[in-house]
Image: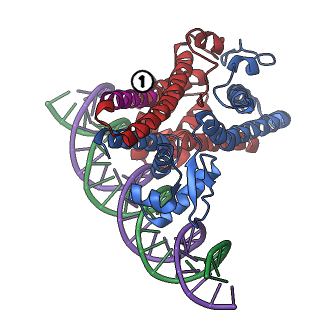
Chain colours: A red, B blue, C purple, D green
Amino acid sequence: MHQDLAAVNDSTVAGIGRLARFFGFNEVMGRLYGTLLMSPDPLSLDDLGERLQISKGSVSMNMRAIERWGMAKEVWMRGERKKYYEAESDMWQVIRNVLGGREMREVQLALQVLGDSVKRLKSAQDELTAEEQALAEYYLTRVADLRNFFEFAEMMLNSLLITEGDGAPEELGQNLGGDFDWGQTFEP
Amino acid sequence: MHQDLAAVNDSTVAGIGRLARFFGFNEVMGRLYGTLLMSPDPLSLDDLGERLQISKGSVSMNMRAIERWGMAKEVWMRGERKKYYEAESDMWQVIRNVLGGREMREVQLALQVLGDSVKRLKSAQDELTAEEQALAEYYLTRVADLRNFFEFAEMMLNSLLITEGDGAPEELGQNLGGDFDWGQTFEP
DNA sequence: TTGTGCATTCAAAATATTTTGAACGTACAA
DNA sequence: TTGTACGTTCAAAATATTTTGAATGCACAA
């Protein structure tokens, strides 16, 4: 193949691998996804292992993860017994799939834990010595700060995830406005 | 200390540790930061090692990383020879520090690589066979998709980073509007 | 300047993650 | 139903990351 075409493919695949690592996936996942993205035609597991020089097992496991994240899907090639994959090429869809499955859970969990902390602190008020009460106060402000932050993050994520159809969110601000106090600060 | 206060401290510290891992830091960094955040007073390296039961070396190295990320700063305690730290408690500032130092670089790099690819493809046009030209076309659309995506990400980041003062960005949309085509899609 | 009390460094050890490949399972063509 | 061509699994190996603690460095009080 022409040298420049190969170079473009390689640097893109390497770049996406780097990004994948950066976002907490492993690099091979990124390179597999990149390879699919840069291929006009679906590729089989063998094709992928061949191109990236990795073992059958690794291709199989990593591709399954990629599929679960909604970053690629299987494609049926008639008359073929092999599995073929093609990349989800709408970046917004990929982002939505990943955020929806991961960051969202993480934020929900954080909010849950913080909510529990507030309850716990408030219901313990009576049993506390003066010194402990001061610490409880302090904890409440810190926990409130964190909650504000995560509520904001949740709202941002929702506005991305709710967006219908392809492409960039039509107007990010639209989904966010309304019931959120934008003027807040974390140092009251 | 009262059981509920300890529990709130511990679950918050654990939660922030988890988040740190999630965002590509190591868990100990998160727990150190969480411990500082939940302490009304600055803590020394020994205090931190003691509370988290980790070695002097680990505290030293991880705290330095935390400091570099702008997540905590040193505090001078007069008459003390120890180093004391306190957490940066403005979450928005933390986010800005981290994004500014990391994601921003990453996005810039990606844009740079993609820009190079476009140049390379365009200047190679002449030397290509018909088949190679078709592939080059395909590459150009994929690379353009990625570029749109990263340009959007860059703009989002800028609007967060540019915000002055404490607290949540006053109006995220404001910084974004204007020169960006919100109506674009990645599948023209 | 010296002694002391820290922080820092770094090589080795511990731990965690990822890859490999052989063994196994499965679906499909014949 | 059988043989085959594939995919999947998983334990062991390879690799990467993190922690440890002893050695070292540094600044300050005296």
Q: Main secondary structure of the magenta part?
A: helix
Residue B186 falls in image quadrant: top right
Neighbourhood count class around disc 1 (C-alpha, 10 Å): few under 14, some 14–19, many 20 upward: few
- Residue B64 lies left or right of residue A4; in this view the side is left
Q: Image point 66% across, 16% down: which residue?
A: B187
Residue A21 horizontal/vertical position (percent): 55, 44
Q: Image point 44% across, 22% down: which residue?
A: A76
Residue A126 falls in image quadrant: top left
| Front residue of this view, candidates B46 and B122 | B46
Q: Assign the N terminus of chain A to one quadrant of the image.
A: top right
Residue A68 horizontal/vertical position (percent): 42, 29
| Front residue of this view, candidates B86 and A54 | B86
Residue A120 lies in the magenta-colored region: yes
Q: Which residues are magenta?
A: A107-123
Q: Assign the C terminus of chain A to one quadrant of the image.
A: top right
Q: Is residue B113 above or below residue B76?
A: above
Residue A75 shows in the view: yes
Residue B142 shows in the view: no
Check disc 1 and report the residue beneath it. A79
Q: Image point 63% across, 9% down: which residue?
A: A174
| Front residue of this view, candidates A71 and B96 | B96
Residue A122 horizontal/vertical position (percent): 35, 28
Circle 1 chain: A
Total residue callouts: 1
Q: Regarding mark 1 in the picture, which secondary structure is present there?
A: loop
Q: Is residue A169 above or below residue A16?
A: above
